[in-house]
Amino acid sequence: MVSGNNRDMQDLPAKAVLGRAALIGLVTGIPTAIIWADMQGEELDGTVLPAAMFLLAIILGTVGARLAGLPRWGVVGLVGGSATWLLIGALAVLVPVPESELFGPLPALVAPVYVVGGVVGFALSAWSFMLPLRWWAVALAVVVPLGSWGAAQYKPQILAWLEVRSFERSGVPLIAPAIQGYRLVHVDLNAAGQREPEPSTWLEYWRDATPNRGFSEIQVTVWPAAAGNPRDSCLAVTENFGVPLRCKSLPGDRWVRTGAGSSWVTVFARSGDALVMLNGSGIAEADLVAALSTFRPISAEELAMVM
């Protein structure tokens, strides 16, 4: 037989259940969010703090669910407290605390976001266990927190996969030069926009200084062939900080742009189905032109590893 008090709990309207659950999620989430935000960057493995935070969330959730008269308060407190902890922990990884050069870490900027995660997690749990029970709703209350937590643990792998996919779907030919003595240190993928009608990849190569020679840098940009031709690309810029630039043609539809008194040399050419530009400092014009012959296919995975 169901007592009158328990019957009142079961008869709570959905809006009341969600409102009370959200309030409990707020109370449960605030201390959890503050601890997660404050402890970022510190090594937590092997400490009792994560377990203590998890237990605190369950205790606060269970006590709150009982005091609020939520249906199935025992289960809701357990599942809701767990969901609050898992979602806030996931957000702490996916939305890390920003840092300012003047003020250092700024946990106050992200702690409210973490609290919202706790509120959502507890409200979802309470709603899922309302009568009549629906298996898909209960599954949702379990899958969302656990899925978010799991995704956060594999954040580097997921980001790497997304970067690989962005290169594969960019429309930019996946090529790069293999310049002897230089190492690829940085890669950017630039989407098409108002300033650049076509997408491009930007690659930066360094040659370290030695006692016998200075530091040298080569910047490489690769566009789809539709971006233009070497001649027009070379002539598109006629001066740089007031210094006149001039272009000259070389056999094979290759163009070289130089400026008086500048150590930079820029070469435009076609490489397969791509328009390429090599912009070098501390390197002879002949060596930069010779680098055009070193372009080779490169995988999206290789490019993503350098980003």
Image (cartoon, rainbow, N blue to C red):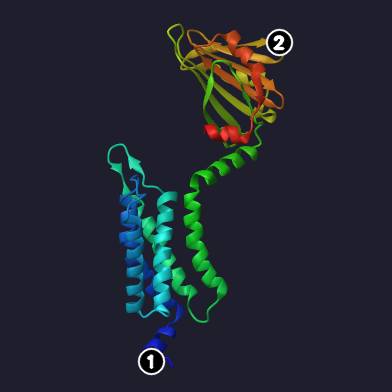
- Quick one: 81 or 239, which is closer to the camera? 81
- Quick one: 245 or 101, which is closer to the camera? 101
Q: Give the SS element for disc 1.
A: helix
- Quarter of the picture containing the N terminus is bottom left
**Which badge, 1 or 2, is on the more N-terminal residue?**
1
Q: Which mark is residue 251?
A: 2
Neighbor class of circle 2 (other Cα within 10 Å; few <14, some 14-19, many 20+) is few
Is 134 on the left or on the right of 13, as rendered? right
Quarter of the rendering containing residue 105: top left
Q: Mark 1 sits on what residue? A: 4
Neighbor class of circle 1 (other Cα within 10 Å; few <14, some 14-19, many 20+) is few
Quarter of the rendering containing residue 117: bottom left
Give the residue type that dot 1 points to.
Answer: Gly
Is 225 on the left or on the right of 137, as rendered? right
- Looking at the picture, how far across and down is residue 237, in whole percent? 56, 19
Q: Is residue 296 above or below residue 27?
A: above
The residue under the point 47% across, 50% down is 153
The residue under the point 69% across, 30% down is 226
The residue under the point 49% across, 57% down is 148
Query: Outermost residue, left direction?
Result: 103
Query: Outermost residue, bottom direction?
Result: 1
Query: Outermost residue, top direction?
Result: 212
- Looking at the picture, how far across and down is residue 224, in whole percent? 67, 30
Give the residue type that dot 2 points to.
Answer: Pro
